[in-house]
Image (tube, coloured by chain):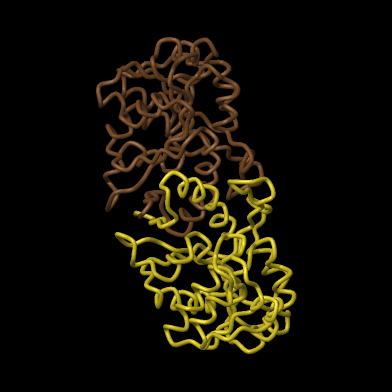
Chain colours: A brown, B yellow
Amino acid sequence: MKIAVLGTGMAGRTLAARLFALGHEVTIGTRDPAETMGRTEPDRMGNPPFSVWAATHTQVRLATFSEAAAYSELVINATNGSETLQALELAGADNLAGKVLIDISNPLDVSRGFPPTLFVKDTDSLGEQVQRAFPEARVVKTLNTLTAHLMVNPTTLESESSVFVSGNDADAKATVTRLLESFGHTDVIDLGDITTARGTEMLIPVWLRLMAALGTPMFNYKIVR
Amino acid sequence: MKIAVLGTGMAGRTLAARLFALGHEVTIGTRDPAETMGRTEPDRMGNPPFSVWAATHTQVRLATFSEAAAYSELVINATNGSETLQALELAGADNLAGKVLIDISNPLDVSRGFPPTLFVKDTDSLGEQVQRAFPEARVVKTLNTLTAHLMVNPTTLESESSVFVSGNDADAKATVTRLLESFGHTDVIDLGDITTARGTEMLIPVWLRLMAALGTPMFNYKIVR
């Protein structure tokens, strides 16, 4: 499948590499490709500059948000939550219309230090904001509840864990579920419509505290019945 | 141990019965024992009147919030979140001072229908409100992340699951952890100080949606490493 991954941070890179390895044609979208490739310093999370990663992933194309979305059949939003709506505006509503739009972002407000709080929650969610802003996109919220490596390599954990899908379009959720299963996920729970993204986005506060308590981001939730 | 369970709903009854079965001397606290025993209708959750339960649990005493707390060495708040601070006021700060106060409540706002929202979240928590209101109590937030039956019978699930403790007093958390282990919990995660209750209280929105999706409250989170 032709897949656009919007965002050049660790989540975007990790998803892009795994999708390419699985045989997809992957385009990473960014605001300004020349500016992205020209960076020489680690990003604010301490990751190497994008160009270092790109040098070892030459078959993943870098393009503008708009070009990446226009070219692809399925779009993954892996930008920061605070930049998500703007990035998707740049991708263009016409380029998203009718397509499955996987939203993995979290509405983190880092302005008050660690742990971040959420800039939308409880009575609304970023997933819903995305769906409202792009009503013709078929938004599926997923993978916002675990670290990038485990999003696409869940079998590296000691036992099975769970991921969630939220969205209004059953066919879109089925497509996303197949993609998740191709990553190795074996317990994909359909929570319901896009409003259920309120639930998974509100998992982040305990995730942040678990990361601090366990000293690692390499964990995930399993829903034990 | 002498244990007070504040609250006569399903959570309070389930905890009281299990604690009694484990050999503890249990007193259930309520606002007005005569009024509680005089009810003849199911409660708003559809549970039988308290007197029906009490008839088969005659060795669990019913007393006022204040009497129950004064008599006991450890106090469990199992009242509704919206009534928690008032119930603890009635229990009395002097009767809580120095004692381990286990808070299992959730800040549910049911005024807008289902699913409920949270009346405090993200930048504060009900656990912190309790600790601030009763600074001499040694508050431990726990067991607010699963249904009453599983709080005290976790081994009925198909495999191991996790529970969390949040609190400022290490000795209090150690006491609570032993109590949780006596219920059958084998993965008790210490998240840190009472501010980490923000994380576990914000698990409720996804718990409510999981209950709807799975059609049962009989599930729990396992943190898979």
Residue B144 picture location, percent across and down: 53, 62
Residue B205 picture location, percent across and down: 55, 48
- Residue B30 is drawn in which quadrant? bottom right
Report the front residue among B171 and A190: A190
In this rendering, position of residue A51 left or right of residue A111: left
Residue B40 picture location, percent across and down: 62, 71
A36 w.r.t. A82: above or below? above
A120 w.r.t. A168: above or below? below
Count of numbered tags: 0
Report the front residue among A176 and A193: A193
Residue depicted at x 53% and y 85%: B60
Report the front residue among A124 and A71: A124
Residue depicted at x 64% and y 40%: A123
Tell me the quadrant of the picture where the N terminus of chain A can be found: top left
- Residue A88 is drawn in which quadrant? top right
A62 w.r.t. B118: above or below? above
Tell me the quadrant of the picture where the C terminus of chain A can be found: bottom left
Residue A135 picture location, percent across and down: 56, 19
Q: Would residue B168 be visible to someone looking at this image?
A: no
Residue depicted at x 49% and y 28%: A168
